[in-house]
Image: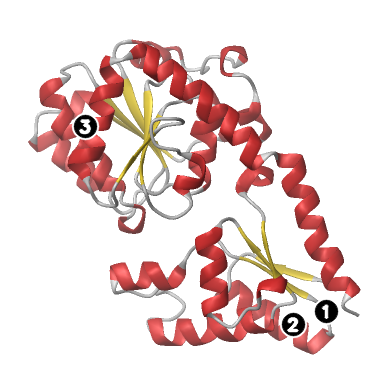
Amino acid sequence: MIRAGDPLLCGLIGLLVAQRTGAKLIIRISAVNDRIRKETGAAMMPSFLRSGRIESFIEHQVLSRADGIIAPGKEYVDFAIRNGATSDKIKVIRYGNLIDKRHLVEPLERSLPEDGELSNILASRPWMVHVGRLIEVKRAEDCYNVFRILAKEHRDVGLLMIGDGQLRDTILRRAEIDGLSNRVLLLGNIDQEKIAAILVLCTLALSPLTGRSLAEVAFAALPVVAYDLDWQSEIIEHSVTGYLAPEGSISQMAEYASMLLKDEPSRRRLGKAVRQRAFQLLDPEQQTRNEREVYADALRDD
């Protein structure tokens, strides 16, 4: 059996090897590629192929021939079906069994970051945190735009970003121009133990589109303000486990974040609720059982 982590380069290699060897092919979908290409006007993997049309062709060839498809949510299922997959080959398996176990630890039982200076910085003011790649597809710069709005109203608030990407320099340059550099902290790519420790010291999370990272902040019992995009509404129920803003509405996201900064009881209530929802929706052991079923079903087809 061959398991490929995307329906493009990995999927193409997997398909060719499967056809040569007679192995079963399982594809895990990691993004809704056609939606992203439409929004950006660019290929998903420009270093592999510069043509979105050829990418679409490959996706269709791979997904229509796969013996099993793992999709983390409904939008991913729809993407697979649009590309020739049949519903009986697709199983929804969420991100739970891809999450580092240190994120499952109760927030109050987590160790503080080993970096004492960082702990002091995080204790000095409320911090809004974003975890994810700093790239346009992930709308990472929207977090800075939200922070910039709130910086005038909440003069102590800071923006903490964990992850790296081509927008890093842009965000740092904008913060310097706006005179906000002392309240913007970009940590780059750090290990999971440090992320798990840092998250519980933050005040709320911003999630324009963060994928698996949304699960990490949910397990940290952080109240979340997210766009109603991708799978995010499956874990963020508006006013119950967080706040959902319309896709691209920076002003609405800023308004919800401002409400949370002012309301500690709501932060505690939403944080507790989103952690409970994360365990209900993403239970790691259940997701692993579900994934084993995909492999067993593919083998039974023989």
Q: Position of residue 290 (x, y in %)?
A: 76, 53
**Badge 3 is on which residue?**
255
Q: Which mark is residue 99?
A: none
Q: Amino acid at mark 1?
A: Ala
Q: Which residue is mark 2?
A: 17
The residue at the point 51 percent across, 30 percent down is 274
Secondary structure under tag 3 reads helix
Of circles 2 and 1, the one toward us is 1
User: Earlier along the polypeptide chain: callout 3 or callout 2?
Assistant: 2
> What number is the disc on residue 23?
1
Residue 193 visible here? no
The secondary structure type at the circle numbered 1 is: loop
Asked if residue 277 is positioned above or below residue 265 in the image, the reply reads below
Answer with left or right where residue 71 lies relative to residue 240: right
Q: In which image quadrant can residue 29 be found?
A: bottom right
Residue drawn at (87%, 77%) of the image: 301
Image marks 2 and 1: residues in contact by CB distance under 8 Å: yes
Of marks 1 and 3, which one's residue comes earlier in the chain?
Answer: 1
- Mark 1 → mark 3, Cα distance in angstroms: 52 Å
Q: Secondary structure at mark 2?
A: helix
Alpha-carbon neighbours of circle 1 within 10 Å: few (<14), some, or many (≥20)? some
Q: What distance separates the C-alpha of mark 2 from that of mark 1?
A: 8 Å
Total numbered labels? 3
Q: Residues within 10 Å of mark 2 (few under 14, many from 20)?
A: some
Foreground residue, 33 or 256? 256
Residue 295 on image: x %, y %: 82, 64
Instruction: Mark 1 and mark 3 in contact? Answer it, CB < 8 Å.
Output: no
- Whether residue 74 can be seen here: yes
Of tags 1 and 3, which is closer to the observer? 3
